[in-house]
Each structure stands twice: as C-alpha cells, then as structure tokens.
Image (cartoon, grey):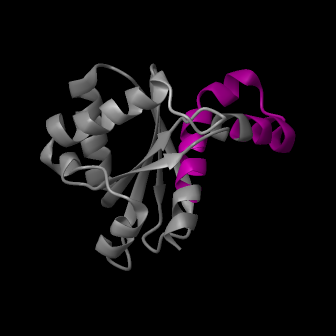
Amino acid sequence: MPIVDFPDLKASLAASSRLMALDVGTRTIGVATSDALRTLATPLLVLRRAGLATDLASLADLARKQEAKALVLGLPLNMDGSEGPRCQSVRQFAANIAARGPPALAALPIVLQDERLSTAAVTRGMIEDYDMSRAKRAGRVDAAAAAWILESALARLR
C-alpha cells in the first residue's frame, strides 16, 4: 500500500486498531506498538538488519502477531525541515515494503512521522531518569525511539 497522510489514515482505521512504528536505521530497526485504542506506545524490540527480504519477513511476522493495522515510519528530517539522504533511505524502505513485502506487511498503510531528535531525547531520558549505562542503552534506544515516534503519530491522530 502506498504512503498515506494522517487524515486519510485516521479515516481508514477502525476505532480499535493497533499501529506499529519503525525507527529504520542502517544496522537496526527499532519497533514499537500501540494498544488497540491507540493511547499508549510501547517499545517492542530492536531488529538487527539482515538483508531486505529477511527484514521484511521479520516485520511481517511482527505485524501479524501484534495485529497492526498500519505502519508509522520515522522520517529523519534535517533540523531545518529539509530532507537529506537518510530521508531518501526511509522513503525507499517504505517503497520496498509496499512493492516487495509479504502480503501481511505490504497491505498496511504507511505514514511518515517527523522523528527529529527522537533518539537524542530518548537517550537523554535514559541517562537522566534511569542512569542507564551506555551498554544497556545500546540494546534499547532504537525501540524506545520507535515508541517516541509512535507517540507523536498517535497525538496527530487524536
């Protein structure tokens, strides 16, 4: 399914339907899910990138298990709002989901959510609120960033 905007997504979703957010990086993909009422975003896991086909199969399995009805991909805009190479990479990943993803994944609508400073905000919170070591943060920050992205998207849908 192609990329949609937030008003179209809101109009197409049932009142109780889960969303799954992805923080797509070059080495990992952070994954978060919402509750069915779309009020809470929860970090789920961090996938190690293992090639496009494997990544898409893993995401399709997660989407099926989590009963996701749409995907939210973090769009890493530059601070001035312009798009750079990382945005192009995320847009290409979205296109790959639609064109090459397993049916369970390719059928889901995709929205792009500005993710500026998501990783920085999450990392700062992990340090200040939990005094978490760098080693502990490394395995969790991408999933937490995906939850931050999802929280922003949920707010837009309200």
Residue 71, position in %: x, y?
A: 36, 52
Residue 131, position in %: x, y?
A: 84, 35
Q: In the shown orientation, is residue 93 left or right of residue 141?
A: left
Report the magenta stretch's main SS.
helix
Q: In the shown orientation, is residue 85 left or right of residue 103?
A: right
Q: Is 147 above or below relative to 145? A: below
Tell me if I can see residue 143 in this picture: yes
Total marks placed: 0
The answer to which quarter of the image holds residue 41 is bottom right
Instruction: Please identify the residue farthest to the bottom as the structure is shown.
Output: 15
Q: 26 or 78, which lies in front?
A: 78
Tell me if I can see residue 25 in this picture: no
The answer to which quarter of the image holds residue 120 is top right
Residue at image position (20%, 51%) is 1
Residue 62, position in %: x, y?
A: 32, 46
Residue at image position (79%, 37%) is 124
Residue 64, position in %: x, y?
A: 26, 53
Say if the magenta span includes residue 150: yes
Q: Is 99 above or below relative to 65? A: above
Say if the magenta span includes residue 31: no
Q: Which residues are magenta?
A: 122-151
Residue at image position (47%, 66%) is 35
Q: In the shown orientation, is residue 70 left or right of residue 125?
A: left
